[in-house]
Amino acid sequence: MAQAVIPGDLLVTGSLIASSGVYSGTTSVTNSMVSATAAIASTKLQHRRAKVDSLANQGATPSAVRRVIARVYGATATLVAFRVGLVNVLASGTTTVDLYKNGVSVLSATVQLNSTPGTGGTAYDSVAAAFSSTALVAGDVLEVVGTVSAPSGGGGWYTNLVYDEDAA
């Protein structure tokens, strides 16, 4: 069947019925075209979760910890970023941090924080982790596991986890 080409705008004031479907280009609906009052159900959206968790008081020397920081509720999710930092610089020692999914590490290597700049050696400095696995599913539990070796001074360590979660 031949296609009709309309070289300008088309306004339909009544119903438009397509018997075999409607095709629209990949850029046909953009963010600016969606009204803020569109009331799109959350089940049709992807959610970016950004969780910051303080794992020790600001003045406290870092100590060993294992703590749940997130649980996945959506059908699927993807880890985007994980950073660890200290509020106050360690005078000496090392803090080692890992991210677990259901009790197993998802990092290529643990994050090491110490007194060297770029490794947590500057107040509020954070160190990025690399993932060995980024896939998550509903029910996955994410934990931060931290150990310390001869810490002195500093303290107040924190984590920043970012993941994208599909609707449940």
Image (tube, rainbow, N blue to C red):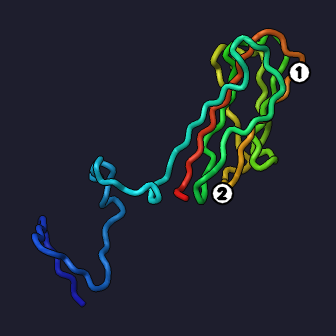
Q: Where is residue 9 in the image (x, y as percent from the top left)?
A: 12, 65
Looking at the image, residue 151 sits to the left or right of residue 165; the answer is right
Q: Which of marks 1 and 2 is nearer the N terminus?
A: 2
Which quadrant of the view contains residue 51? top right
Query: Dot 1 lies on which element?
Result: strand
Q: Position of residue 111 (x, y in %)?
A: 76, 31
Looking at the image, residue 26 sits to the left or right of residue 15; the answer is right
Residue type marked 1: Ser
Query: Dot 2 lies on which element?
Result: strand
State the residue at coordinates (64%, 20%).
125
Q: Do the residues labelled 1 and 2 touch (CB within 8 Å)?
A: no
Decide if residue 127 is in sight here. no
Of the two numbered discs 1 and 2 in the rendering, the one whose residue sits closer to the viewer: 2
Q: Vertical placement of 54 versus 100: above or below?
A: above
Q: Vertical placement of 45 versus 66: above or below?
A: below
Which quadrant of the view contains residue 163? top right
Depth check: 18 or 23 in front?
Answer: 18
Numbered disc total: 2
- Classify 10 Å Cα crowding around label 1: few (below 14), some (14-19), many (20 and above): some
Looking at the image, residue 133 sits to the left or right of residue 37; the answer is right
Residue 137: which disc?
Answer: 2
Residue type marked 2: Val
Decide if residue 30 is in sight here. yes
Residue sitting farthest toward the right: 150
Q: Mark 1 points at which residue?
A: 149
The C terminus lies in quadrant: bottom right
State the residue at coordinates (33%, 50%).
31
